Image (cartoon, helix red, strand yellow):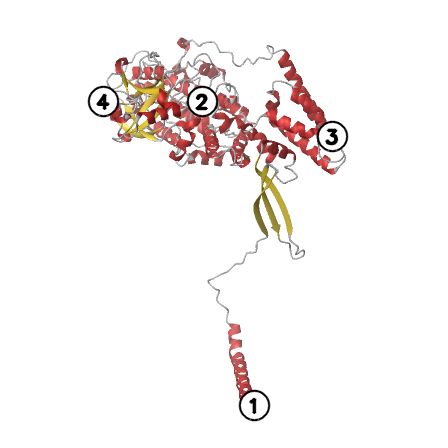
Amino acid sequence: MSENGESGNTIGAFILKFSRKLRDCYLPGLAGVKAEPSPMKTTWYCPLDLSTVVEEEEDGVIYTVVVKQQHGSLNSPMSAMSRSQCVKAGTEEKLVLHLLHSFSMGDSSFVTIFLSTYRSFTSTKRVLDILSDRLENPPGESERSQTRQAFNKAVCTVFSTWLSEYPEDFKSLGEPSRLLRLAPLLPQDSSSAADLRARLLRIAEELSEKALLPEAHKDQTGSTSPSLDASKFEPTSVLGFPGALIAEQLTKIETELFVRLVPYHCLGSLWSQRDKKGREGVCWSVRATVRQFNKLANAVLASCLWPTKLRSQQRARLLEKWISVAEECRARKNFSSLYAIVSALQSNPIHRLRRTWQDTDREAVRRYEELSEIFSDKDNYSQSRELLKEEGTSKFANLDNRLNNKHVNRSNAQGTVPYLGIFLTDLTMLDTAVKDRLDNGYINFDKRRREFEVLAQIRLLQSSCKNCVFTADEAFTQWYQSVPTLTEEESYRLSSEIEAPGLTPTVIITQCPDLSTSRTSLAGDSDSLFDFPSPVNNLLSKLTKHMRSPSVSCLDVDTTPPSSDSTPATLTPSTPTKSHRRSASCGNNPPNNIPGSGPDMRIIRIRMDLQDGNLYRSILVTSNDKTPTVISSALEKHNQDPKQASRYELIQLLPEGKELIIPATGNVFYAMTSSSVDFLLRRKGGNTPLGSQPINTETSATFPRIKAKGRRLVRTLF
């Protein structure tokens, strides 16, 4: 054992001595050599904040709780914990009461979101009743307690915000009893509460006067304007106004309407119910925007179609004028007027004027197509959204060198007037796709948060328009107000007088939306949403209704020479350009001439045998569709119960007033004839006479379309 121990010690000593010699020999040399940088680099991250998200359910409410742990510094190694919670869902009462407790819980955005969206799931009267009940039993042992003081502060904040941003909620109560109950319950020990009390009592006094003297407070906005004398309308006078002036006046009108827009009127749950009985007055601010949109589109149609005796070169000057106006609207970030003009130019009564478009300046047509691309539905209207994102709050439009700065006065900042249809589409899709309530019956407030994100975008754009200043031009205003309203039939009749329909149309395959042009409330309702019964009627109100399906557009063969009678001296034709491509929109062709639909599908138009006999809806019929399926789809599009399909029969309207009854269990695709695409949905056993023979009109414009996967979700809302 001793010998082994001695040998081990000897070996250890040798190794130690050898390692020391190696160190002494090589370390000095290594110290003088600079180390090469390593190609691999590792960085270690130490998170300063750790967040945990959990859900907690209490009596009648579900909270999303965020717990954050913040690591301390070197000087204070102790970590700090913070906790915030926001409401995810709850009962109606709990959501209302959370208004008074949201600040203490860290849910700072709840009040703003609730006041913007509560009309989707409750009413002003109900909210006031719940809050009044709570104010009668406030927390805290005394007025001076800390709990009572915090509660009173929250009460003042909630009602001050509510009265400032939504005073119409209180003015529309109808009777003052709730306000008279609420006023004395407000805190007594603050000046802000005293001011709130005075404001509530003033509104209560107004409601009392309105109840006692209803005639003195009757709304006069519904009075009809005097009928216009169409003989005094001079369509070519628009050529005498500079394009910049027209765009400025249109922007003035649109900006004033947009600033007055009430954002929550755009909520899908409200907008989709606007046509129901008893809800005629809802969403009035959106209806006003729709009326202006339709009025402008009608002005474009009337000015281009009314003078039927113009030569094609002269009419082309009118198209060039409106293209110039559209370009000026783009420079002013007035996307609403821009789209109204583009849609009117894309409507069939104007689009089908082949000779006129051939004589239109090629450069003008190229600019028109570029402007049309702004509202392309590609990638969910990505180009429109990108422009709003880039220019929404900027002072000026982001124009290229070609447009330069000649269009606008750069000394005045420009607000942004968006095409409201994009927001209406988003909110309608959101309302349809997300449940209003959870499985346990709680109101889904997370849905309201998502809706508020869209409403916040509208409010941000409104803020950019509030300081815009415009000067009215009486001459243009007088011309604009003198434009007569053209019906769908009148528009097509004038277009046919200009260029008669050919016998052998040239077919262009295109993607087009639904052919529906709803014309309800046409008689005597000047405030109706559907004031403009034209091919571009209801562009905003029917956005998510249109199907993404192929269809066609006709370029009619030239069969009649142009007339040179009644030529205004102001029209000076330029050298025509004979060939260019144009944006195609829908036409109404025989089913056999629909190559875009394929051999086993056709697009038909169906109306119901009601008082409004011209309310058409388009249906895509395939070779597999039986009569009950088509009737159900038609009822659904007409906002009727599709389960009642068995009570209706489908009739094809043939030329010369003839009818073809489709068998109740037959295949519609093979049973229909190729002579007409117009159908009638009639209740079985009914003998309602047809008011007139179906009019074969090429009706439509290039409308926005939704993605196919969302089509089924929103069809019933429109």
Q: Position of residue 385 (x, y in %)?
A: 45, 35
Name which residue type carries label 3. Ser
Q: Which residue is mark 4?
A: 504
Q: Quadrant of residue 399?
A: top left
Q: Work out whether mark 4 precedes mark 3 in sequence or the reverse, and give the earlier one.
A: 3
Q: Residue furthest left?
A: 504
Q: Work out whether mark 3 precedes mark 2 in sequence or the reverse, and give the earlier one.
A: 3
Q: Position of residue 251 (x, y in %)?
A: 48, 24
Q: Residue furthest bottom?
A: 3
Q: CA distance from mark 2 to mark 4?
A: 35 Å
The 10 Å Cα crowd at callout 2, few under 14, some 14 to 19, many 20 or more, is many
Q: Which residue is mark 1?
A: 2
Q: Position of residue 590 (x, y in %)?
A: 26, 23
What is the secondary structure assignment of the residue under circle 3?
loop
Q: CA distance from mark 3 to mark 2?
A: 48 Å
Name which residue type carries label 4. Thr
Q: Which residue is mark 3?
A: 190
**Would residue 71 be seen by someone viewing this image from the given angle?**
yes
In the foreground, 370 or 471:
370
Q: CA distance from mark 1 to mark 3?
A: 98 Å
Q: Is residue 557 above or below residue 98?
A: above
Q: CA distance from mark 4 to mark 1?
A: 120 Å
Q: Is residue 30 above or below residue 639?
A: below
